[in-house]
Image: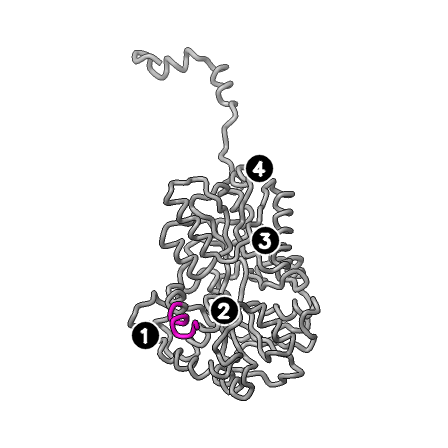
Amino acid sequence: MSPTCNRRQWLTRIGAPALLSMSILPVARAEPAWTAIENRAKGQTVYFNAWGGAEPINAYIQWAGAEVFKRYGVKVEHVKVTDTADVVKRVRNEKAAGKTNGSVDLVWINGENFLAMKREGLLLGPFAEGLPSYAKVDTQGKPTTRLDFAEPTEGLEAPWGMAQLTFMVDGKRTPKPPQSLVALLAFAKANPGRVTYPRPPNFHGTTFVKQVLVDVNTHRNALYNPVTPEAFAQATAPLWAMLDQLHPHLWRAGKQFPQNAEAIRQMLADGELQLALTFNPNDAANEIAAKRLPASTVSYQFSSGTIGNTHFVAIPVNASAKEGAQVFANFLLSPEAQARKADIAVWGDPTVLALDKLSAAERAAFAAKPMPGQVAKSAPAIPEPHGSWVDALEKEWIKRYGI
C-alpha cells in the first residue's frame, strides 16, 4: 500500500471477494509441545547408559526399548556400564571438547553422580516434570522422587524406581535376625565370621556404611547439607568407633571384604554367611523364584528404618537424541512400564507412582500376590545423606580399612 493510499481506499480497491478469500485462508496452529517432541523423536537412536550387571534388569530394558520402538519409532541401545562415574567422566570430557552430539543420550543415575553432573552443568533440563507420565508420580508419599541424596532434582532427572536397604537371612537357620545396629553387633559377636558387607566404593558397601552413620548420629541435620571437614569429623567419629568394634567379628575378621552384594548373597545360599544385604526389598523373592535361594529366606529392615532412595534417569546436556530420550523416559514412568518393573517375575523394582492416582485397571496391574522372600512389613525409609558425603566416606573408609 502506497503512503498516499489510506485504509478506506485500499479496502475499496481490493473488493469484497478478495476479502472473503483472505478470511478463509487456513490458520497455522501450533503443534502441542509433547506431540512435537514425539514427532522429532521418530527415527532417533537413544544410547541408554545403564548398569548391566543383572540379567532381569537387562531383559526389562530390552523389553522397554522394543515397546518404544514399536510405538514411537525410537530405537534404544542399552550401553551396559559397571560404574556410572565413568559415564559422568565421558560426558564431562565430551563437553570440554565442544562435542555437541554426545555419545550418551540417557543415563541411569542418582547420588553423587547426579550431584556432580548438576554442579558442572552437564544435564539437560528441566525436563522431568514436563513428561506426561510425571503427573502420576508420588511426590508426597515418596519425597525422594524430588530429592536425590538430599539434593533437589529441579526437574533435571526423572524418577524411575525406589530402593531401600534390606537384609535377608535363612529363617530356618536364623529365626531371630538382628533388628537394629546394636543387635547386629551382638549377633556378629555371637556368630563370628558369619556376617560381612561389601567393600566400598561398591554402592551396597557404601550404603551399609551410611546406615551405620545415620544410626550412630541422633542429630542428623549436618548429614543433609554439603559436607565440611568439621561436620565430617564430628559425625564420623562414632561411625569409625562402631566399625572398629564390628570388624573383628566379621567374615575373615574384617581383613577382607567381598566385592559386591551378589557374592554375599551366594555365600548366604552356600551357608557360609548368615546375613546378606540388598537395596531391593524384592531381591530375595526374585532369587527364591529363580531357585538361587531357599524358600525359607526372609527379608526385613531395621525396625527403626533403613536408608532409602529413588533412582532416576537423566539426559546429558549434549545428548544427540534429546527428544528420543524424553520419549523413552516418559514410557519408563508409565503405569504399564512401572507395573511390569514391579513384578517380581520380571524385576521386582518398587514403583515411584502413587497408586491412588491410577485408574482401577492400572492399579490392578500392581496387585500381585505376596511371594516368599518379600519384606513382610516395610520399615521407615531414612533419606540418604547429601551426595557430597559419599566420596569423603569412601576415601576415609579405604584409608582406615582398605588393606
Q: Quadrant of residue 298?
A: bottom right
Could you give the CA–CA distance between mark 1 and mark 3, rounded to whole angstroms? Answer: 44 Å
Of residues 395 and 73, which is closer to you in this image? 395
Query: Element type at marker 1?
Result: helix
Could you give the CA–CA distance between mark 2 and mark 3, rounded to whole angstroms? Answer: 22 Å
Question: Is the residue 361 above or below the residue 290 in the image?
Answer: above
Q: Which residue is mark 2?
A: 308
Is residue 235 magenta-colored?
A: no
Query: Element type at marker 3?
Result: loop
Q: Which mark is residue 334?
A: 3
Tell me the mark number nearer the camera, choosing from 1 and 3: 1
Please report whichever mark, 4 or 2, sits nearer to the chain's N-terminal start.
4
- Residue span colored magenta: 395-403
Is residue 402 magenta-colored?
A: yes
Q: Which residue is mark 1?
A: 233
Could you give the CA–CA distance between mark 3 and mark 4, rounded to whole angstroms? Answer: 21 Å
Q: Which mark is residue 390?
A: none
Residue 169 point in image, percent of width and height? 61, 78
Q: Give the amino acid type for the residue marked by disc 4 in the picture.
A: Gly
Please report whichever mark, 2 or 1, sits nearer to the chain's N-terminal start.
1
Please report whichever mark, 1 or 3, sits nearer to the chain's N-terminal start.
1
Residue at 59 percent across and 78 percent down: it is 273
Q: Are marks 3 and 4 in contact (CB under 8 Å)?
A: no
Q: Give the amino acid type for the residue marked by disc 2 in the picture.
A: Gly
Q: Which residue is mark 4?
A: 43
Could you give the CA–CA distance between mark 2 and mark 1, rounded to whole angstroms? Answer: 24 Å
403 sits left or right of 358 in the view: left
Q: Give the amino acid type for the residue marked by disc 3 in the picture.
A: Ser
Residue 152 point in image, percent of width and height? 40, 59
Tell me the mark number nearer the camera, choosing from 1 and 4: 1
Quarter of the image with the N terminus is top left
